[in-house]
Structures are given as structure tokens and as C-alpha cells.
Image: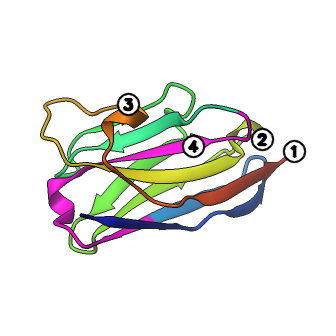
Amino acid sequence: QVQLVESGGGLVQAGGSLRLSCAASGGTFSSYAMGWFRQAPGKEREFVAAISRSGGVTYYAESVRGRFTISRDNAKNTVYLQMNSLKPEATAVYLCAADRNYSTRLRVAASEYDYWGQGTQVTVSS
């Protein structure tokens, strides 16, 4: 079983950038596809981005495509989310998740991920 710990959240002005990190332990990191989700108060958990086990394939929600970049370093057991040109509507708790099941496609449904971190708060002021 893998444990996930997010970091890097904070308060940023609209148009600014943040880089989130998610450190994994307790499992074979390279055997998991990874995803980032976000959840704002009173809203459902929303898919943001996903990356394949090798890092060679990525997929983004339409709302963040071109502004956010997901990457991973399997040697460091860490997945990243670089967020640029942030908008106030990006304010949420950001969570990373691990998918242990082999699939030829990256998953976008939260229910398909097996392990979750506690999340890190991102607040974008206008």
C-alpha cells in the first residue's frame, strides 16, 4: 500500500504560479499511474490531470490544459503539478491519487483511483 503526501500549496494572486508535489512511500511508485484532483467547498472532486507509469503519457482536464503540467520523477517517488496563469476558480484542496490497476488509458474518475493523499490547499486571490 502506498502513502501519498502533498505539499506546495499556498496563497497566490491571479496570474501567478505554484508547483505542487506529491511524495509517495510504501509501494513501488513506478507501478502506479498518478492523478491530480481538486475539490472546492461544496463541490464534487474534480479531475485535473493524470500521468502514466513511465511519465510518457499525460492527460488534462479541458479547464487547465495549456496552463498546468503534470510530471513525475520515479527515482524520487514524486509526482508534480506545475500550475501557471492561475485563476480564482482554481481555489481548492488539491489531492494526488494513485491508480494500481494496469490500464491502457489514463483514468479521470476519482472512484477509479486506489490511494489518496490528504491534500494541499491552493487559494488564488483576485
- The alpha-carbon separation of the residues under discs 1 and 2 comes to 6 Å
- Disc nearer the start of the sequence (1/4): 4
Residue tagged 1? 126
Select label 3 or label 2 by which is in front: 3
Q: Is residue 33 above or below residue 11?
A: above
Residue tagged 3? 108
- The alpha-carbon separation of the residues under discs 3 and 4 comes to 12 Å
Q: Is residue 25 magenta?
A: yes
Residue extent of the magenta highlight: 22-42
Q: Circle 4: is it few (<14), some (14-19), or many (20+) Cα within 10 Å?
A: many
Select label 2 or label 4 by which is in front: 4
Q: Residue at x 38, y 30 (%)?
A: 108
Q: Which mark is residue 88?
A: 2
- The alpha-carbon separation of the residues under discs 1 and 4 comes to 19 Å
- Disc nearer the start of the sequence (3/2): 2
On the image, the x and y values in percent for residue 24 come to 33, 68
Answer yes or no: do the residues labelled 1 and 2 have beta carbons within 8 Å? Answer: yes
Q: Which mark is residue 38?
A: 4
> Given the image, on which type of amino acid does mark 2 rest?
Pro
Determine the secondary structure under disc 3.
loop
